[in-house]
Amino acid sequence: MKYIVTNQNQKYEVEVFEEGDSLKMTIGHGPMAEKFDVDFKPAGRGSLYSMLVNDKSYRVIIDRKGSRSAVFTRGYRFEFDVEDERTYLMKSHIGHTKVKSAGDVKAPIPGLVSKILLKEGSPVEQGQGVMILEAMKMENEIKSPVKGILKKLNISEGKNVEKGQSLFVVDEKSESQIA
């Protein structure tokens, strides 16, 4: 399985796979990828692990909170985010398609509209969820880019949408127009 590991401004592609009776790991891709033999097992209770990497032994403490991990070994602490490749790609597509102004909000990825959270004509806050879009077995809340009125829903529950298809229209209103 492939993972994307980020630490500050660094991003690494990590793939973990079985080869025969052992576990292998590559970091990077193409001709620059490094390959490692890995053995990783719990060592008692909690977050203590025994890890062998290319026959070198490490005692490792791993503290996980969501996708964020802190690893302690040999007097050093490393912090990074770990996401499987599919989740990382989906989040990056959603993050790059957000709009910052009122108007037509389009689907960032193809999927199924599983739930509509608001009705046409409802006031909506910036960042408030308007609908749930299911894609790749994950639920993604599609949010309003601005405070305003949900002017029009262009899709109904249970319908499939394509990337870039119009989902809804938000009409930006001032505080006095909403009240």
Image: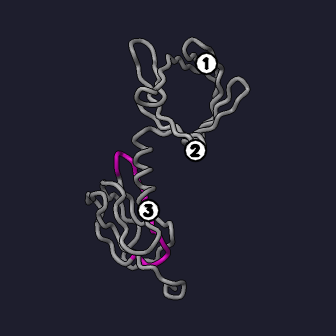
Q: Main secondary structure of the magenta part?
A: strand
Confirm whether residue 46 shows in the render: no
Q: Please tell me the numbered disc located at residue 170.
A: none
In the image, the segment drawn in magenta is: 135-150
Q: Are the residues at dot 1 and dot 3 in contact (C-beta closer than 8 Å)?
A: no
Is residue 62 visible in the rendered image? The answer is yes
Residue 139 sits above or below residue 175 on the image:
above
Residue 50, which numbered label?
Answer: 1
The crowding category of the residue bearing disc 3, from other C-alpha atoms within 10 Å (few below 14, some 14 to 19, many at least 20), is some
**Is 16 placed left or right of 133 in the picture?**
right
Q: Amino acid at mark 3?
A: Lys
Q: Which mark is residue 98?
A: 3
Amino acid of disc 1: Ser
**Residue 98 falls inside the magenta stretch:** no
| Relative to 48, residue 143 above or below | below
Specify whether 137 is left or right of 8.
left
First of labels 2, 3 by sequence position: 2
Residue lying at the far bottom of the rendered structure: 176
How far apart are the alpha carbons under marks 1 and 2?
Answer: 28 Å
Q: Secondary structure at mark 2?
A: loop
Q: What residue is at 37 percent from the left and 78 percent from the top?
A: 151
Residue 141 magenta-highlighted: yes
Disc on the earlier residue, 1 or 2: 2
